[in-house]
Amino acid sequence: MTPVALFPMTPGLCHELYRGWQNDPAICADPARFRPFRYDPDWVDRYFARQQTPDRRYFAILAGGTVVGELLLKRIDRAAGTCALSIHLQNDSVKNKGYGTRAEKLAVAYAFDRLGLRAVLADAVKGNARSRHVLEKAGFAPCGEDETFAGYRIEKPEP
Ligand SMILES: CC(C)(COP(=O)(O)OP(=O)(O)OC[C@H]1O[C@@H](n2cnc3c(N)ncnc32)[C@H](O)[C@@H]1OP(=O)(O)O)[C@@H](O)C(=O)NCCC(=O)NCCS
């Protein structure tokens, strides 16, 4: 099995990731707003810079040492003991190989063991069946929905 790891994102990895990037229509609540991605080095520099905030951890997902996606732990709230997970793999060639499930499990373990948090939240566009299935495979439970999004949550197990 190809080893999967989370590695703190670097500018070099971020450019490598986005040079081969395809936006996935499944994340668009409104399909009319979908736009294909075109690599723009200046955009990548600005995007990378925006992730460098104290309430975020921005990871490259590596499979066999190659960057195949990104994962963010956002809105890290140490008082509440929570954060929110988002994930996007690079393009269709790296999907459905088990990388997303394993990356989510690694991120949840990081949130609990390294950040000392008690719960991780996530949401998915309601029609994004693959993302919802993968969140549940990684241990998240549904926790409500609105017109557009389904919410998920995973709690740190009691010791
Ligand atoms: C969602 C995502 C992170 C999942 O990662 P992945 O590596 O592709 O997923 P995995 O290979 O770990 O698992 C895929 C699972 O979904 C299932 N699946 C695939 N397409 C599906 C579909 N259309 N509907 C339901 N399940 C589907 C697969 O059968 C597999 O489940 P199984 O192991 O029980 O058979 C990845 O596909 C991705 O980045 N998608 C685009 C962005 C996105 O949707 N991000 C999430 C935003 S909330």
Image: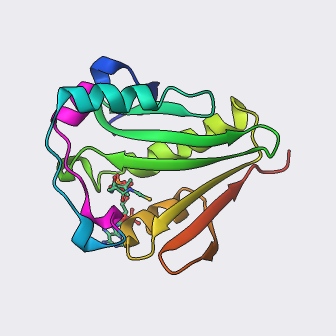
In the shown orientation, is residue 37 left or right of residue 87? left
User: What residue do we see at 29% from left, 56% from top?
Assistant: 96
Pick the residue in front: 64 or 69: 69
Q: Quadrant of residue 74?
A: top right
- Confirm whether the magenta stretch covers residue 23: yes
Q: From the viewer's perspective, is residue 97 above or below residue 124?
A: above
Where in the figure is residue 148, as x and y percent of width and height? 47, 76
User: What residue do we see at 25% from left, 66% from top?
Assistant: 33
**Quadrant (top left/top right/bottom left/bottom right) for the C terminus:** top right
In the shown orientation, is residue 16 left or right of residue 149? left
Pick the residue in front: 145 or 104: 145
User: What residue do we see at 15% from left, 36% from top?
Assistant: 39
Where in the figure is residue 71, as x and y percent of width and height? 44, 40
**Quadrant (top left/top right/bottom left/bottom right) for the N terminus:** top left
Where in the figure is residue 139, as x and y percent of width and height? 60, 59
Which residues lie in the magenta part? 15-28
Where in the figure is residue 4, as x and y percent of width and height? 40, 35
User: What residue do we see at 30% from left, 25% from top?
Assistant: 45
Q: From the viewer's perspective, is residue 133 above or below residue 84?
A: below
Which residue, as the protein is rendered here, is positioned at the far right?
159
Residue 5 visible, this angle? no
Picture quarter with ligand 1:
bottom left
How many numbered circles are shown?
Answer: 0
In the shown orientation, is residue 36 left or right of residue 51? left
In the shown orientation, is residue 58 left or right of residue 24? right
Residue 122 visible, this angle? yes
Q: How is the image coloured?
A: rainbow
- Confirm whether the magenta stretch covers residue 145: no
Pick the residue in front: 149 or 71: 149
